Amino acid sequence: MSYRLTPRVQLRSSPATFSKAFSVYRGEPPRLVVAMAAEDITRLTILSLSMSTTVSPLSVSMEIPAYGATAAKAPLEPLKIERRKPGPHDVEIEILYCGICHSDVHKVNDDWGGTHFPVVPGHEIVGRVASRGTSATRFREGELVGVGCLVDSCRVCPECRAGREMFCEKGVTFTFDSFDQNTKMWTYGGYSTNIVVDERYVLRVPKGLDTARAAPLMCAGITTYSPLHQFECKPGDQVAVVGLGGLGHMAVKLAASMGADVTVLSTSRDKEKDASRLGAKHFFATKEPGALDALQGRFSLITDTVSAPHDLNKQLTFLRNFGTMVLVGLPPSGAQLDAFTLVHGNRRIAGSNIGGVAETQEMLDYCGKNGIVAEVEVINADQINDAYKRMERGDVRYRFVIDAASLRA
Ligand code: NAP
Ligand code: ZN
Ligand code: ZN
């Protein structure tokens, strides 16, 4: 096997690094792989290699600034990444803002296992169309668009046809840390200046929404809107939201906008005033002794957005008969469930994973009509590591959003 280095690439890595990179691609021979020069980490260099029999898409790629991590729990740092040039159906987006989701933090910490480093997180992207491929017709240059958690899927399997691309039977391509079957490259997310995405996966941002505050809708918005729809939230329903962070505050705003009577369960008493301003009618501080006694059998729906392990059995007792607790938070370790608590009252427990492209557009249009956006703290890229620390402490009001201009500076 011989390798051809694409232009602009210098070989600064050992054979061991290459064999490690190739070992990821057992099975079908790779058309293209990206390897990292692990020994030359002071300024991260991404090496692109291709087999001599194929044309490397990277030979027509562009190099852009980004922020990412090179190892689990390592601080994020400036680095350069390659983006493909827009193909016929692609749009190139100049990123304006990108929200920071706790999933980004889990990925950088490798909380769930399997993170592929270097990782460039970010899946709450808002930007303007900078250029488009010859057959891309859905958007015009300059239009304000969004990119959420996914950027490709097979498009023909039953799940894709049903608009549930996140469950694509051939494997969805997530916006970052995902192996793209077409380009044979790992995807890099929105902590960067530009992104190239097939227009089928690009979202239209309704006019009138604040640009920075619309970015978190691409994940926090759809992840909380989807279960409210699935479980038919309606006026007068007693709905609880556990955890008042990025997802939690969107859940409160959305459930309140649908007419629900919303209760926030939070570890932080000092978020009480905010909960009320966001639309919650009731607030309980979960760590205060006896505070939760009044909640037995109260809610038809509980949306649990908590990012860390916690007691689910206690929360289940807050459901009324046939009520549902839907988990959207993804703590790294699993939970023990008490069958008696579930069986008594036919209580239900469910999960919900983001939402497909059409439902995400539906959510954006809904937010456009109802003037719903996130509460954000706009930061520069060099504040990302502080933001991660604050999120790990639950100290977020209520979404950090990176100003991509700070990456261009
Ligand atoms: P976030 O902004 O950091 O908010 C999480 C909130 O959970 C915190 O603000 C805190 O709220 C609460 N919390 C944190 N540690 C806790 C603990 N030990 N015990 C009880 N409560 C605790 O995170 P996020 O971006 O909203 O994401 C939340 C979770 O959802 C993450 O696990 C993320 O990976 C996951 N997620 C899932 C999906 C999906 O498709 N299902 C999509 C996006 C994100 P209080 O201060 O109010 O207690
Ligand atoms: Zn997310
Ligand atoms: Zn599919």
Image (spheres, rainbow, N blue to C red):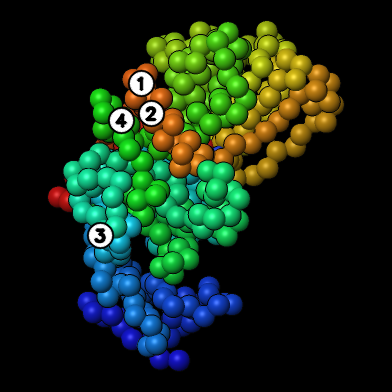
Rendered view: 200 above or below 364: below
> Residue 206 — which label?
4
**Mark 2 touching mark 4, by CB under 8 A?**
yes
**Mark 3 touching mark 4, by CB under 8 A?**
no
User: Distance between the Cα atoms at labels 1 and 3?
Assistant: 32 Å
For the N terminus, the image quarter is bottom left
For the residues carrying marks 1 and 3, which lies nearer the camera in this image?
3
SS type, badge 3: loop
Rendered view: 318 above or below 388: above
Of labels 1 and 3, earlier in sequence is 3
SS type, badge 2: helix
> Residue 134 — which label?
3
Of labels 2 and 4, earlier in sequence is 4
Q: Is residue 34 left or right of residue 162?
A: left
Give the amino acid type for the residue marked by disc 2 in the picture. Asp
Of labels 3 and 4, earlier in sequence is 3
Give the amino acid type for the residue marked by disc 4 in the picture. Pro
Q: Toward the viewer: 114 or 166?
A: 166
**Mark 4 touching mark 1, by CB under 8 A?**
yes
Instruction: Tell me where residue 328 appears, x and y as whole percent.
Output: 57, 35
Inspect this view and state whether residue 56 appears: yes
Question: Looking at the image, which residue is at 45% across and 42% down?
Answer: 357
Q: Cβ(mark 1) to ligand 1 < 8 Å?
A: no
Q: Toward the viewer: 342 or 363?
A: 363
Give the amino acid type for the residue marked by disc 3 in the picture. Thr
